[in-house]
Amino acid sequence: MQLLNSFKLALRGLLINKGRSFLALLGIIIGIGAVITITALAEGLRAEATQQVDELGTNLIWVIPNMSDNESRTQAGRRGFYTPVQFTDSEVRAIEAALRVPVVMSALVAGEQVVSFGRESQFVSVEGIDENYNELYDLDLSEGRWLSPGEISGSRRVAILGSKTAEDLYGTTDPIGETVDIGNVRFEVVGVIAERGGGLGSNPDESVVVPISVAQQRLFGIGDEITYITMKVGNMQDVEIVKEDVTRGLNRIRRITDPDDENFMVMSQTDALEQFGQFVDVLTMVLGGVAAVSLLVGGIGIMNIMLVNVTERTREIGLRKAIGARQVDILFQFLIESIVLCLLGGILGMGLGWLGASGLSALINQALSDAGWEPTISMTSVIVAVLFSTLIGVIFGVYPAVNAARLDPITSLRYE
């Protein structure tokens, strides 16, 4: 009953000066709103990454050229001028020889080229693939056919277009059998990939697929170099075994004995998701720290308004003490008032955060046509926001409440 009365008195005190109370709330509203916006976008990004991993499967492994730890310590490495060593056909064979369990392996070449037909042109991702590519990624075609093993091994100039690339270049015209210029090389279009969508990685809707040897020799001029290697493991328990085998095979052919000299990266889908999660966590903490400054400013504003309230209501405090109110009653009243003020700011801030996250995600999705970024406000973030608002009310409300409780009743009644 006493708590309810204190709550009613707190609301009455706040409603006496609505404008001033709202201005005091702004720091809390903006701070909580920023925190909710950041966490909602971060959780949405994490959910999008997890969904893509689930769609592709967690049994994929990538082998990617990478700067070694020793190379990263060099002057060129620190300045970002070092180019990682690409793989070769002989290294692919060395990896195959080192594997102890069966896998499906595909060597790929990737880059960007201008793709054109008539007056239309697009700058898109071009992938040179081998005969195992579609077994790994299982891409459906909306029309046409997939590249045959003979076309891949025979370096035929045939191409499969992503759905958006085909639409941008040919409009409503059927592209099958038409020609398309990739760089300065003319290809025959034999298929179109069904619309799939993308997000955090490459988007197959905005891509072109050609035989790997044609990409190596005619499009990128890189000889037998390979951009990266993808493998699919039949049994999830074998993922770590395959990673060890790949590392051992590459170290043997590259004569690497020191792990700090390993100039490649072997990464599973789970590893990629964990690294991405760590990146999101760090980004959230950094941006959350910036938002915390607003909460600090808001807390100081709360303390200021509460000190003003104590001064303005000195006679009221003296009167309450004169009729029997204890110091703890006065302390509790003003502390509850501070907490209520911060809780109102927290609730309004959560609404602002939801609007901010929804608006930003809509802008991102509009700017990036292949993004499917939806904000996610978790119950944890809501609970943390409420608790944090309450904590701010307690921390910044204690000093004004103590000042009010210590006022002498006789002096307070004489206050003008």
Image (tube, rainbow, N blue to C red):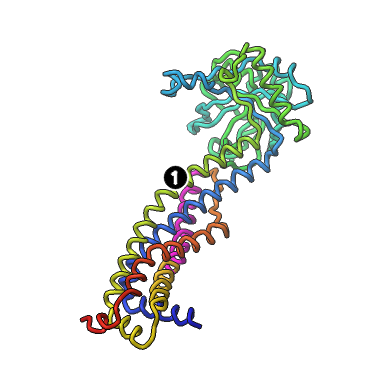
Q: Which residues are magenta?
A: 344-368
Residue 128 visible within the image: no
Point 39% across, 59% down: residue: 30
Q: Residues within 10 Å of mark 1 (few under 14, many from 20)?
A: few
Front position in the image: 382 or 272 = 382
Is-magenta flag for residue 347?
A: yes
Q: Position of residue 114 (x, y in %)?
A: 50, 28
Q: Residue furthest bottom?
A: 323
Q: Is residue 34 above or below residue 213?
A: below
Residue 371, position as x, y percentages in the image: 54, 45
- Residue 385 is situated, as x and y percent measured from the top left of the image, at 49, 60
Q: Looking at the image, is 339 positioned above or below residue 297?
A: below
Residue at x 73% of width, y 20% of height? 150
**Does dot 1 land on a helix, a strand or a loop?**
helix
Specify the farthest residue to the left.
416
Number of callouts in the render? Answer: 1
To which quarter of the image does residue 55 belong? top right
- 381 lies above or below 344: above
Q: In the displayed structure, does residue 10 sit left or right of residue 84?
A: left
- Which residue is more in the foreground, 38 or 222? 38
Q: Is residue 80 visible?
A: yes
Residue 399 in the figure: left or right of residue 95: left
Report which residue position mark 1 lands on.
286
Task: Identify the main secondary structure in magenta.
Answer: helix
Corner quadrant of residue 196 = top right
Q: Amino acid at mark 1?
A: Val
Vertical placement of residue 149 versus 322, above or below: above
